[in-house]
Image (spheres, grey):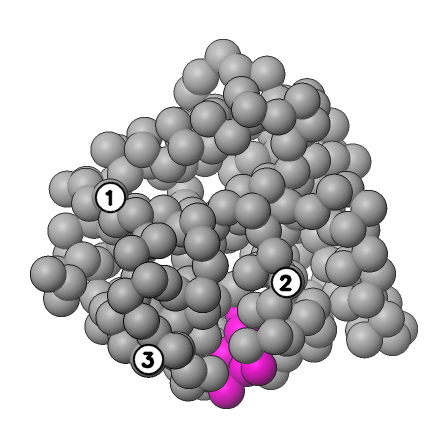
């Protein structure tokens, strides 16, 4: 499944440091905004896309026409918890860009029926006209959003169980491993593939193996990020460390 046609559709941009990586990502976002009257941007959380958001916040561009959709959200955290992705996005995007909070959509982890919450999120994305540009990170086990190894390549927004590796990777944001949630709501791989353009940002040596598997290995549920090879419009921004295993 991972033929040269799919791989040739992935544009690789390599930068030495976080600042230049963030600038390249911001340029791509602004290109998307310029080409559409009411753009829809999908946003990821984590350390990799943070330089991009800082670059956007440092400019003077108008984001009032943009609708935003988060990739995922933890299940089990109290409303307003500092590490909930709703709060992270408020701190990193909504307030710095001066957005109307109503334009930022996040899966509802407090719904009594989480399967219905996933379906409602899919409907909300569709009602907005679909996502024009989806910003992504990659987990060190190859997960995309919170689609862990084994996730169906056509999966939709749903409840997902986080692996021990993912929870340990995110422990740095919490007081202890026990505080890291065990479940989340995440856009599915099929949902992500429907975005018109994908932007994957990878930073750090610990992402190098996963990035190489995603871009040069077989398309397989064991490396969820390998679905990038099935999309026709992908840009990968990687620092030297993350790209170190790529030719």
**Residue at x 10% of width, y 61% of height:** 247
Question: Sequence-wise, which precedes: disc 3 or disc 1?
Answer: 1
Question: Cβ–Cβ below 8 Å for labels 3 and 2?
Answer: no
Label 3, residues with CA under 10 Å away: few <14, some 14-19, many ≥20: some
- With respect to residue 14, does 52 lie above or below? above
Residue numbers of the magenta segment? 146-152
**Residue at x 64% of width, y 32% of height:** 39
In the image, which is nearer the foreground, mark 3 or mark 1?
3
Q: Which residue is mark 2?
A: 191
Q: Farthest front residue?
A: 5
Question: Sequence-wise, which precedes: disc 2 or disc 1?
Answer: 1
Where is residue 112 shown, x and y percent of the image?
89, 73
Q: Is residue 151 on the magenta stretch?
A: yes
Viewer-proximal residue among 230 and 238: 230
In the image, which is nearer the foreground, mark 3 or mark 2?
3
Which disc number belongs to residue 13? 1
Q: Which secondary structure class fits the magenta region best?
A: loop
Mark 2 secondary-structure assignment? helix
Q: Which residue is mark 3?
A: 218
Image quadrant assignment for residue 151:
bottom right
């Amino acid at each position: 499944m991972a033929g040269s046609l799919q791989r040739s559709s992935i544009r690789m941009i390599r930068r030495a440091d976080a600042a230049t990586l963030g600038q390249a990502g911001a340029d791509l976002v602004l290109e998307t905004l310029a080409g559409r009257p009411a753009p829809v941007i999908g946003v990821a959380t984590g350390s990799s896309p943070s330089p991009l958001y800082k670059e956007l916040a440092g400019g003077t561009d108008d984001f009032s026409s943009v609708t935003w959709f988060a990739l995922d959200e933890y299940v089990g955290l109290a409303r307003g918890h500092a590490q909930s992705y709703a709060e992270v996005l408020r701190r990193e995007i909504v307030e710095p860009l001066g957005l109307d909070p109503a334009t930022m959509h996040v899966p509802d982890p407090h719904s009594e029926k989480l399967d219905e919450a996933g379906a409602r999120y899919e409907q909300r994305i569709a009602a907005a006209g679909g996502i024009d540009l989806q910003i992504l990170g990659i987990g060190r086990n190859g997960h995309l959003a919170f689609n862990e190894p084994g996730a169906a390549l056509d999966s939709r927004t749903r409840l997902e169980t986080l692996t021990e590796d993912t929870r340990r990777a995110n422990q740095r944001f919490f007081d202890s491993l026990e505080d890291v949630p065990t479940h989340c709501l995440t856009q599915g791989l099929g949902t992500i593939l429907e975005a018109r353009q994908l932007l994957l940002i990878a930073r750090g040596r610990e992402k190098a193996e996963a990035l190489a598997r995603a871009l040069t290995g077989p398309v397989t549920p064991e490396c969820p990020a390998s679905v990038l090879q099935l999309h026709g419009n992908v840009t990968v921004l990687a620092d030297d460390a993350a790209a170190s295993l790529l030719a």
